[in-house]
Amino acid sequence: MSAVESTDADADDAEVEVEVIDEVDARALTTPMTVMDSVGMVRDADGLFEVTTASGREYIVDLAAPDDARCLCDDHRYRQRPCKHIRRCQFEIGARPIPSWVDRDDVDEQLGQHVSGEPRWSA
């Protein structure tokens, strides 16, 4: 989520850390969706989350999968990369920090509302 960029402006060749956010992260933070960790089949299951989108689709996300996080959505299954549902769950519980420059007014108001963890904003 962050990149290190070198600058020649200083004589010491200091490194400047620049926080970046990709398209998947942006959608994860701004798309309306409800993430819950204490309902149905995910209740009392560490690392499991139920994600419901604005269209009513439901996905199960497993952040504790042995190899890597998994989601039942088509994007994750076919592209074999973290989808917005996985990233959203990571943001929800603070496992993935939200860059401090992100405008809080642009973030979905439900972020962190229905899970036991809480979002973490970078310093």
Image (tube, rainbow, N blue to C red):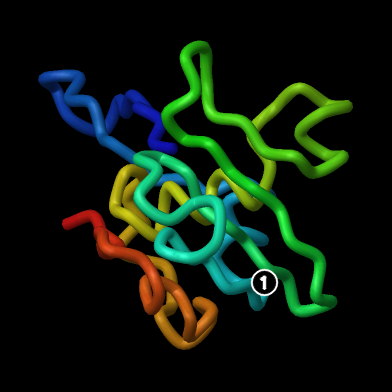
Residue designated by label 1: 31
Where's residue 15, x and y in %? 23, 26
Q: Is residue 55 above or below residue 96?
A: below
Where's residue 110, x and y in %? 48, 81
Q: Residue, x 70% and y 27% (percent of image)?
A: 81
Q: Residue, x 40% and y 31% (percent of image)?
A: 3
Q: Residue, x 42% and y 56% (percent of image)?
A: 43
Q: Is residue 118 toward the left or the right of residue 23 in the image? A: left
Where's residue 90, x and y in %? 43, 47
Q: Residue, x 23% and y 55% (percent of image)?
A: 122
Q: Residues within 10 Å of mark 1 (few under 14, many from 20)?
A: some
Say which of 105 and 3 sits in front.
105
Q: Is residue 79 toward the left or the right of residue 51 in the image? A: right
**Quadrant where the image shows the N terminus:** top left
**Quadrant where the image shows the C terminus:** bottom left
Q: Is residue 40 toward the left or the right of residue 102 in the image? A: right
Where's residue 23, x and y in %? 68, 50
**Count of residue discs:** 1
Furthest residue to the top? 67
- The amino acid type, in three-letter code, at marker 1 is Thr
Looking at the rendering, which quadrant does residue 111 occupy?
Answer: bottom left
Q: Is residue 40 above or below residue 5?
A: below
Say which of 109 and 37 sits in front.
37
Furthest residue to the left? 12
Q: Secondary structure at mark 1?
A: loop
